[in-house]
Structures are given as C-alpha cells and as structure tokens.
Amino acid sequence: MSSDTRVRFAPSPTGYLHVGGLRTALYNYLFARKHGGTFVLRIEDTDRKRFVEGAEEALIDSLRWCGLDFDEGPGARGDEDGPYGPYRQSDRQELYVAAANKLLESGHAYRCYRTDDELQQIREEHQANKSPGRLKVRLPEEESARRAADGMPSVVRLKVPDGETLSVNDLVRGEVSISSDIVDDQILLKSDGFPTYHLANVVDDHAMKISHVIRGEEWLPSMPKHLLLYRALGYELPQFAHLPLLLNSDRSKLSKRQGDVAVEDYREKSFYPEALLNFVAFLGWNPGDDREMFSLDELIEEFSLKRVNKSGAIFNLEKLSWFNQQYLRERPVAETIGQLRPLLTEKGWGEFDDAYLAEVIELMKERVTFPYEIPELGSYFFVDPTEYDEKTVKKRWKAESGERMTRLAERLEGGSWKADDLETVFKDQAEKEEIGAGQFIHPTRLAVSGTGVGPSLYHMLETLGEERCLRRIRKATEVLG
C-alpha cells in the first residue's frame, strides 16, 4: 500500500454525529494512517431540506474532540482546505451538472418528466403486483418530447441496462453481485438542479482521487448504481469496504429511540474520548487476540480491514462504561483533581488540598465510572453524613452496637491512624469481646459514611482522619442508639 491511499468521511450536516458515523470516520482514519495516506473530510450538503444550521461545525468539533484530525476538508489547513477543494458539495455544483450532461449525451441517462402523482401510482401498482423488476418509469420518447416542449419540470435519471450482473469485490464481504434488472433508474439530478447522493458521491470520489471507499453496510444497495456510474463516466473504480451495521441488544438497528446515539451525548455525559474511540473500534473489528485497551496509535498499528466482521455489531453501553472506568483509573491524578474541584465548589462543600483529594480518588476510582460520581457516591469524604441508609441500619446496627462503638472509639482515640494499625485494633477489640470483627466493621462504616458500601474501611478511615471519624462515630451512637 502506498501513500496514494486516500480515504474520506463524507457526512451530511443534518444534525448530530451518530456513533455509527464516528465508527466509519475512525476506520477511515486508521486505514489512512496505517498506510501513510490521506484522510479527507467532505461535507455532503446537497440535501438542502435536511440541512441543519451549525451541524457542520458541531460535527467537526466532535471529530477533533475524539482526536481524528483530517488532512483535507473544511478548515483542515487554515485558509487552505486542501488541493481537491472545495470540500462542501454545495460549492461543487458545476461538476455535477457537467457529469449529468455527459451521461445524457452518451445515452446513459435521460430526462424524466413523470409527475409525483404518476410516480406514486407506479409504485403502488408495482407493490400490488409484487413485481421483481425495476419500476417502469420511462416514458415513450414522443411523450417525453411533448412534455419537454410544454416546459414541464424534469429530473435526470440513470438509464439502467437490462440483463447484466453487476459485481464488485468488497474488502470486507468478498464478491457482491446483483442483477441490473432489479435496479431502479436512479435520479441523478433533481428538478432544482441539485444532485442526489449517488451522482455527487461518485463524481467527488473520482475528482478527489479517493482510492478506498470505506462506509456503512446501508450503502450496499447503492453499489450497482455506483458501478454503472463509474463505468458510464469512464472513471476508475476505487476499492470498496462496507462495514457491519450497529445494532441494539435486541439486534434492531441502533437508533435514538432506544437511547443515546450521538457523540455529543456521550461527551456531555463525561465519557473520555479515548474510551469512546476504543469502544467504537471494537464494533465490527477485533485485533485477533484478547487485548481490549488500545491507544489511538496502537489502533493504527493493529488495524486491518481483513479483521472487520460481516455481521452486525451490538452496541453495549455497559461495555462502553467499562472502557471509561479503565481510562479513569489510568488518568493522571492531577487531571481528575482538576475535574473534581469545581464539582465540590458547586456543592458548596469547601476547599480540600491536593494530597487529600488524591487519596480520595485513589480509593474511589475502582468504584466509579466518571469523576462526577466521586462526590455522588463518596459525599462522606467531604461532608458529615446527615442520615443513615435504612436497610443498612436494620441489617448492621444491633441493639448493642452503640455501646460497642463507644468502647471502640475510646480504644482508637490517640492511637495510630494508619490502615494496618486500625485493622489490628478492630480485630483485637473483637477478640477481646469474643465477637466477629464484622460487629465493629459494619457499624463503623455506617457511622462514618452513612452507607453500607464503599472502599476499604481501614483505608477510608485513614484518609478521613481521626477527628472526623471519632466525631461521626459518637454522633451515630447518639442518633441510632
């Protein structure tokens, strides 16, 4: 593979960046970087009815947040977007019109003057008859000429030949073939003069010297039309790779109806971009071994289209959360402290020094997925508990717990407050009173944290410090008896 490798990600600015789009962008990016090639961003904005103001900017921002920098495209190089621009299809209209005219002149396309009502009737009859072939939309030449003379609006349609088998060797799926007899005469140029996806896509991929088209499986039905366009226009075919669909757990197509599907949603929920990329990389690809954690550079090194699966990939939110937890554990403590401080300030819980926050993070990072969960699940590190979990009280606080905790507090006061020494005291006191150590451990956790779960008790006590812990134990004996 040479540096002539050129791939593109070509989204429409119609809203958020779907995680499926991110997967397509990532695989294109990895392929380009692996082979020393070029990653192009092209904005396919010819569908003006679905255009959303600000969507392009949001899309680019999401790509850059994920670390997927493109080599060519809007804003890629400051004032110069790249040598094959413009990179917005709305600025490339002349190319599409010229291609459509070429197809008309060569007889590979024709002007269609069918009305919307006529087309609707044709579709209904086709469905009613369960016809296997293409829709019969072509008018007799005389009728087309008459409608043209009357100034009726028209579209330009691809003239699909009969009786051909259209085939391509897909890099993921192997040979893909379809009969031309079931391929409709696709609209190429709409009545408003704007191209459809099919014409613009083929013209631009050729003009931008795209060597590999890596896109979602949903574009497979378009392959025959594209093959015919490449041939009719005299273009060299790029290589194609169609990626598997992303599926919900019930194997339905991933959609917003069943949960978040936008990159922006996960960014707002504080997922790390590295975690999202690592997770998305595995939606259809695997490295061939048991490894799961990959940096972007490691993904580049290992990525291969040969290891992309054909079958749909299940989007498992629990697995994404697991990835985020792994990246939180590996995060520099200083960074997590920086994320934690404003959360504490917002709650009005006061100021804490870096050393204390570092200890808290070390204790909590095994139990949380996001930094914001530290004050949610570990509020007791920052403020005294004001209430006690009812279920834990019923299960763990016995009639004699108050007296036992008083004796334990007296034993602990003034002693060493290191975790190992605290554990020794707890066990020794339990032996002395001839009871299990749990009779001290569980009530102490409840008294100090207000909950029945949390990190290692002895390390938690060490971090909180003697003054806080003894104050809370004595308060709990007053409240709980």
Image: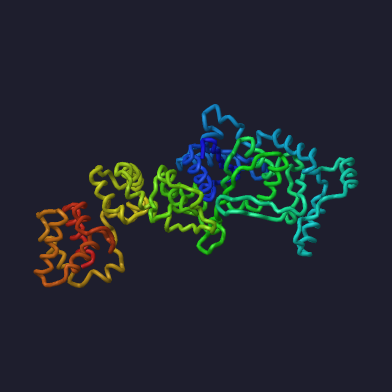
Q: Is residue 62 visible?
A: no
Give residue 397's quadrant in the image.
bottom left
- In the depicted view, which residue is nearer to us: 48 or 204? 204
Q: Is residue 76 left or right of residue 441?
A: right
Q: Is residue 453 left or right of residue 199?
A: left
Residue drawn at 77 percent across, 42 percent down: 191
* Location of residue 367 in the rendering, given as x and y in whole percent from the top left corner: 32, 56
* Location of residue 319 in the rendering, given as x and y in whole percent from the top left corner: 42, 57
Q: Is residue 142 visible?
A: yes
Q: Is residue 47 left or right of residue 174?
A: right
- In the depicted view, which residue is nearer to us: 452 or 212? 212
Give residue 90's quadrant in the image.
top right
Is the C terminus in the top left, top right, bottom left or bottom right quadrant? bottom left
Residue drawn at 47 percent across, 51 percent down: 280
Residue drawn at 28 percent across, 67 percent down: 392
Q: Is residue 335 left or right of residue 188?
A: left
* Location of residue 249 in the rendering, given as x and y in whole percent from the top left corner: 50, 62
